[in-house]
Amino acid sequence: MKKRSNFTSKLGFVLAASGSAVGLGNIWRFPYLAAKYGGGTFLLIYLILAVTFGFTLMTAEIALGRKTGLSAIGAFKSLDRRFGFVGVLAAAVPIIIFPYYSVIGGWVVKYFSVFVSGGAGKAAGDTYFTDFISGTFEPIGWFFLFMAVTSIIVLCGVEKGIEKVSKFMMPVLVVLTIIIAVYSLTLNGAMEGLVYYIKPHMADVSAKTILAAMGQLFYSMSLAMGIMITYGSYMKKENNLESSVRQIELFDTGIAFLAGLMIIPAVFAFSGGDRSALNAGPGLMFMTLPKVFASMKFGGVIGTIFFVLVFFAALTSAISLMETIVSIFRDKFGWGRKGASIFVTVLSLALGVPSSLGFGPLGFISWMGMSVLDIMDFVSNSVLMPIVAFFTCIFIGFIIKPKTVSDEVKVTDGTFKAEKMFNVIIKWVAPIFLVLILGSSVASALGVFTI
Ligand code: PHE
């Protein structure tokens, strides 16, 4: 059998995995959830969940990948044939997400091109975004372009493609985020936004806060979709798994926090403290922020920098999605990287077109008020991910036993500091919470209640 490719160093692994974790979710979703669910209290809850649950699930997935040297389907199957279905479900998640994520990636590239060519004023127009996404060929063109860039990097392989790009883009992303956050804090009226972001608001905290934070955590850390299993399969045994996971968490949570510093004060300054502007969901990034940029000094430059950093974040996440799919096909059918990459590109282009057209010519397709893209997002994130995570916990907790993971973590230097916590969470606490997350997201989609 051909030797599996590896990340060349621990840093390479950590940056590539952080590249997957840091994405659109960190930049628009985290700040908006934090603002909605209690500010400082949400931040604190999120942090606690990240170092407990997030840590446990991520460690489990990376260990499964490194131990078996396989991607999701093969990893589960090779340890217990009956659990191959969990791998299949996990594999379905990136296959669903990658196409629509790349549609949004295309929107980001479009906005970058508008800002860099001096169109900040244009982009701030009231109907600019909706006019754009309801088009037919233009959004598809940007989507294809984004997908092409992703494919080229994946074609170049683990070391020469993914690791190289991550080592360049992730540090640049941090620097750009800090630049905008600092600038944003100097705006008139920004302090009010800062206080709103980090001060605890107990009145906005409820059980839903914890569920919202959990849901965000899974998505943000790219868990339960086979990504960390795949990346783990490229990790060398001499790199310390436990400390790598800590570093990835720090990266992911740090960028999410900084994204809040970048966006919330600016939106407050712009809206004169009216926080409803923050509730725009995805529209925040493409509708509200362009208005904010247009209203500030150097807005054209800041907007350009902003969309570059969002592009880097989206691209490194898209790469991890595509690599996971490619590696599943390679493991399953013994295909080469090139053939598998081309196949996945064509498949994903075809699957993404309906999501892109769902705001225009296919706008009549809707289910519970959701567009095609929203439906894909709902099925993958709110339904499949909790199910996969639940079975992953059961599989590790009761079938192969936590010791299998502990042994893998200890391979490097014999230590696993958080072993006790890991055992309790994977067997008991996480499964219970995952059932609650699944129940609440399905209930909220069906309109029973909303979180
Ligand atoms: N973790 C990414 C984010 O925060 C989302 C993502 C999920 C990306 C799965 C790739 C794969 O935006």
Image (tube, helix red, strand yellow):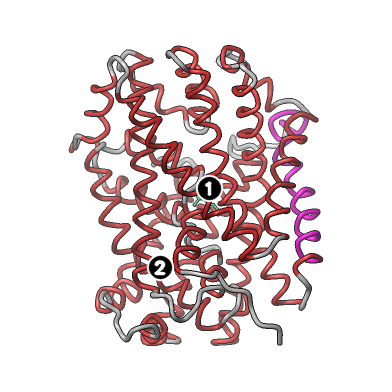
Task: Residue at 41%, 86% (x, y): give it.
Answer: 404
Residue 296 against residue 158 in the figure, above or below: above
Q: Quadrant of residue 202?
A: top left
Image x and y of residue 114, in percent: 64, 22
Task: Residue at 34%, 47% (x, y): give it.
Answer: 254
Is residue 186 visible in the rendered structure shown here? yes
Segment tinted magenta in the rendering:
339-363
Q: Which mark is residue 169?
A: 1
Q: The C terminus lies in which quarter of the figure?
A: top left
Instruction: Tell me the chief SS of the magenta region.
Output: helix
Q: Which residue is mark 2?
A: 57
Q: Are marks 1 and 2 in contact (CB under 8 Å)?
A: no
Q: Secondary structure at mark 2?
A: helix
Task: Residue at 30%, 79% (x, y): give it.
Answer: 416
Residue 188 against residue 83 in the figure, above or below: above
Image x and y of residue 299, in percent: 48, 18
- Closer to the camera, 336 or 446? 336
- Left or right of 434 on screen, residue 378: right
Kind of residue at disc 2: Leu
Q: Secondary structure at mark 1?
A: helix
